[in-house]
Amino acid sequence: MENIIRIKDIKKEFVNDEVVTKVLHGITFDIPKGQFVSIMGPSGSGKSTLMHILGFLDVATNGTYEFAGIDVSTLTDDELADMRGENIGFIFQTFNLLSRTSVYENVMLPLIYTDIPAQTRDEMVREAIADVGLSHRMENLSNQLSGGERQRVAIARALIRKPDVILADEPTGNLDSKSGEAVMDLIEELNKKFGHTIILVTHETYTAQYASRIIKLKDGLVVSDQSNGHKHKKGSKRPLK
């Protein structure tokens, strides 16, 4: 299967007042197109830094990152921004929605500065909202929705440009158990239905079990990279925290 992401010996360090903090110490793995991968690790393991690099929000200090065959280090800041906008969909723990703005307008946001015709944009927004089961809430303001519904809006927004990769950063972190399970069921369904490559960043074993592959980080290194033989089965109960 074709690899959408290839990283080799990725290292990242931050310098602040001549103090060097090394976060990633040489990360190597490939992700095939369409795979659902969980990246797990405790706080300080480097998983958020790695996610920022994979999503073109930051660049590695050393190492090679190839996305769809393109060496990311050869791209300018503007080209990285274009790659991010067109190829990556983000789902955040905090939803990142405009509170006094409708569901429709929140999902429309990634399309505002594109040259996509207005009618096509409207169709894309309505389709993305329908895909997450919120057509009946399209005109509601986001602050009128439940936490689970707000995360569904964020997922619709992530899907709007049909990105190659969806990066989900602790997507159930602000949800109760029932809503969290519903959101993870939806992400799993989108992976199966549309073939999006999903990279789930989490510290929670239960959500990681939805993925077909689990990569574990510790202290900036990969300590485990295995197929998930105990994949979540829909309808199974989520353990209480």
Image (tube, rainbow, N blue to C red):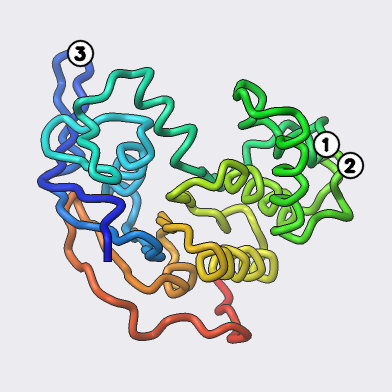
Crowding at dot 1, Cα within 10 Å, few <14 / some 14-19 / many 20+, comes out as: many
Secondary structure at numbered mark 3: loop
Q: Is residue 15 left or right of residue 134?
A: left
Q: Is residue 48 left or right of residue 88?
A: left
Where residue 6 appears, as percent x and y from the top left, is: 21, 50
The residue at 51%/44% (across/down) is: 89
- Residue pointed to by mark 2: 139
- Residue pointed to by mark 3: 17
**Image quarter in which the C terminus is found:** bottom right
Q: Which badge, 2 or 3, is on the more N-terminal residue?
A: 3
| Amino acid on which disc 1 is placed | Ser
Residue 12 or 19: which is nearer the viewer? 12
The residue at 26%/57% (across/down) is: 3
The residue at 23%/44% (across/down) is: 69
**Image position of 144 with respect to 21: above or below:** below
**Image position of 157 with respect to 133: above or below:** above
Where residue 152 appears, as percent x and y from the top left, is: 69, 54
- Residue pointed to by mark 1: 102
Secondary structure at numbered mark 1: loop
Q: Disc 2 versus disc 3: distance between alpha carbons?
A: 49 Å
Check whether the beta carbons of the residues at disc 2 and disc 3 lie within 8 A of each other.
no
User: Can residue 167 be seen in the rendering of this structure?
Assistant: no
Q: Disc 1 versus disc 3: distance between alpha carbons?
A: 44 Å
Q: Disc 2 versus disc 1: distance between alpha carbons?
A: 5 Å
Secondary structure at numbered mark 2: loop
From the viewer's perspective, is the residue at label 1 or at label 3 nearer? 1
